[in-house]
């Protein structure tokens, strides 16, 4: 069973369906995210667009942007709306594609699909088909649609890479995608499974902006660019949600792109993901650059000793420039300090950074002033303790912000 931040896929789907059944059936309930007509107005839907949609669907609008700023939908299109919800965007798309086109409105929550299907029937709209289905397994043949709209959905999907591959599969070559979704600056790393509500409130399942755009580029989409960035959570009625969003740098973006001719091979996609710049950026954001710095320092120090000893037993001598070697070890030790220090701003504890700096200074003393193995080892132990302390403090702070501290001690 795949688990993300402690959640099982079943837990995520159940929480999504429960939350969006309430949005469909009781839209005037209190939510932690903006809903209904006020949300549409805040996010920039024009009055004409809002008024072209039946009021009961507008009332259950739960999008995070206005994807139509991406201008993907054209006259005569077969247009897919993934995670259509009550169908606000599907109705707008139905006007845009005209009588010669079709809109396929698909959602995983039966209550949403039911509400939309009933309204389509009552309003006598002939060009909207409502489907129940998952973004990870679209019930459509390859190249079946000319354009795709998605508003506030991908952050709720457990396997985002698979969902994006599915979008690529069902879109015809050169077809366009317009998407509004939540992105973050710093990924959540604590286990949140004790509170499934956190996933459906749109921050915990969201992706770092750079990784979000890379998901589409890796899958073979081209001209991927951000049309608009919105301080979406500033409009949340919940002070806690506003605090969570601010701590993780959560906001929504509207993105537009075009499907390239072919999907890159799996090997090429893997190499793109392993790009050293992306790997380092990802380690840095997750607070693991300290672990990487310490690992490199230890490897350069003791790994080299082991390698030299092995070579000597094989009769192969190798001379090493001691200053260069010591410089590399000290460099990685101080890199560890540089990676630990910014954590203080997040968790407010200066001690991990102080311990890391002391550890690096001790290692440097042993390397450049007076070598004694015990001193060097003590410096590394202090560095290791500082790295562990920083990760623990970051996680505790995340738990506090997310309101998980009641469970944190258990
Ligand atoms: C934030 S709401 C947005 C609804 C709609 N796009 C709108 O703008 O009002 C997200 C919608 O995505 C649907 N959803 C969540 N996960 C999904 C999945 N894996 N597959 C399909 N739909 C999903 C939910 O049921 C919900 O209706």
Image (cartoon, helix red, strand yellow):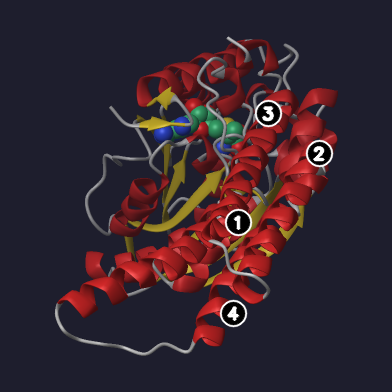
Neighbourhood count class around disc 4 (C-alpha, 10 Å): few under 14, some 14–19, many 20 upward: some
Is residue 17 found left or right of 237 in the rendered image?
left
For marks 3 and 1, the one nearer the N-term is: 1
Q: Is the residue at mark 2 in contact range of ligand 1, meaning its CB lies under 8 Å from it? A: no
For marks 3 and 2, the one nearer the N-term is: 2
Residue located 54% across and 36% down the image = 205
Assign the N terminus to one quadrant of the image.
top left
Q: Which residue is mark 4?
A: 327
Residue located 65% across and 38% down the image = 389
Is residue 109 found left or right of 247 in the rendered image?
left
Q: Nearer the viewer, residue 139 or 32?
A: 32
Q: Single out the mark in the foreground, 4 or 2.
A: 4
Q: CA distance from mark 3 to mark 2?
A: 11 Å
Q: CA distance from mark 2 to mark 1?
A: 26 Å
Secondary structure of the residue carrying tag 1 is helix
Q: Single out the mark in the foreground, 3 or 4.
A: 4
Residue located 46% across and 50% down the image = 99
Q: CA distance from mark 3 to mark 1?
A: 31 Å
Q: Which residue is mark 1?
A: 375
For marks 4 and 2, the one nearer the N-term is: 4
Q: Which residue is mark 2?
A: 349
Q: CA distance from mark 3 to mark 4?
A: 35 Å
Q: Single out the mark in the foreground, 2 or 1.
A: 1
Asked if residue 170 is positioned above or below residue 140 in the image, the reply reads below
Q: Which residue is mark 3?
A: 396
Q: Are marks 3 and 2 in contact (CB under 8 Å)?
A: no
């Amino acid at each position: 069973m795949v688990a993300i931040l402690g959640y099982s896929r079943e837990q995520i789907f159940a929480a999504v369906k429960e939350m969006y059944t309430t949005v469909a059936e009781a839209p005037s309930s209190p939510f932690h995210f903006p809903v209904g007509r006020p949300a549409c107005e805040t996010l920039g839907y024009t009055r004409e667009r809002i008024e072209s949609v039946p009021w009961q669907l507008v009332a259950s609008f739960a999008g995070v942007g206005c994807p139509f700023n991406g201008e993907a939908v054209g006259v005569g299109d077969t247009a897919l709306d993934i995670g259509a919800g009550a169908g606000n965007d599907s109705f707008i798309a139905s006007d845009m594609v005209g009588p010669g086109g079709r809109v396929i409105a698909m959602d995983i929550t039966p209550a949403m699909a039911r509400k939309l299907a009933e309204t389509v029937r009552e309003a006598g709209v002939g060009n909207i088909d409502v489907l129940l289905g998952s973004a990870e397994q679209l019930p459509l043949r390859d190249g079946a649609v000319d354009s795709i709209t998605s508003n506030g959905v991908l952050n709720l999907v457990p396997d985002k890479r698979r969902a994006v591959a599915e979008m690529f599969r069902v879109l015809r070559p050169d077809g366009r995608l317009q998407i509004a979704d939540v992105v973050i600056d710093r990924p959540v790393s604590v286990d949140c499974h004790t509170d499934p509500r956190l996933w459906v409130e749109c921050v915990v399942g969201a992706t770092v902006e750079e990784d979000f755009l890379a998901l589409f580029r890796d899958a073979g989409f081209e001209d991927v660019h951000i049309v608009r960035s919105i301080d979406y959570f500033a409009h949340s009625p919940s002070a806690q949600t506003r605090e969570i969003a601010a701590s993780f740098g959560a906001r929504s973006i509207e993105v537009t792109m075009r499907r390239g001719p072919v999907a890159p091979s799996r090997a090429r996609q893997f190499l793109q993901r392993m790009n050293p710049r992306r790997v380092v950026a990802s380690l840095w954001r997750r607070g693991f650059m300290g672990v990487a710095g310490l690992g490199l320092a230890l490897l350069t120090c003791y790994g080299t000793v082991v390698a030299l000893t092995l070579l000597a037993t094989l009769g192969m001598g190798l001379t090493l420039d001691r200053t260069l070697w010591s410089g590399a070890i000290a460099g990685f030790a101080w890199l560890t300090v540089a990676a630990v220090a910014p954590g203080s701003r997040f968790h407010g504890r200066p001690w991990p950074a102080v311990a890391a700096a002391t550890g690096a200074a001790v290692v440097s003393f042993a390397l450049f002033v007076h070598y004694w193995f015990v001193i060097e080892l003590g410096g590394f132990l202090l560095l290791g303790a500082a790295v562990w302390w920083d990760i623990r403090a970051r996680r505790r702070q995340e738990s506090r912000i997310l309101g998980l501290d009641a469970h944190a001690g258990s």
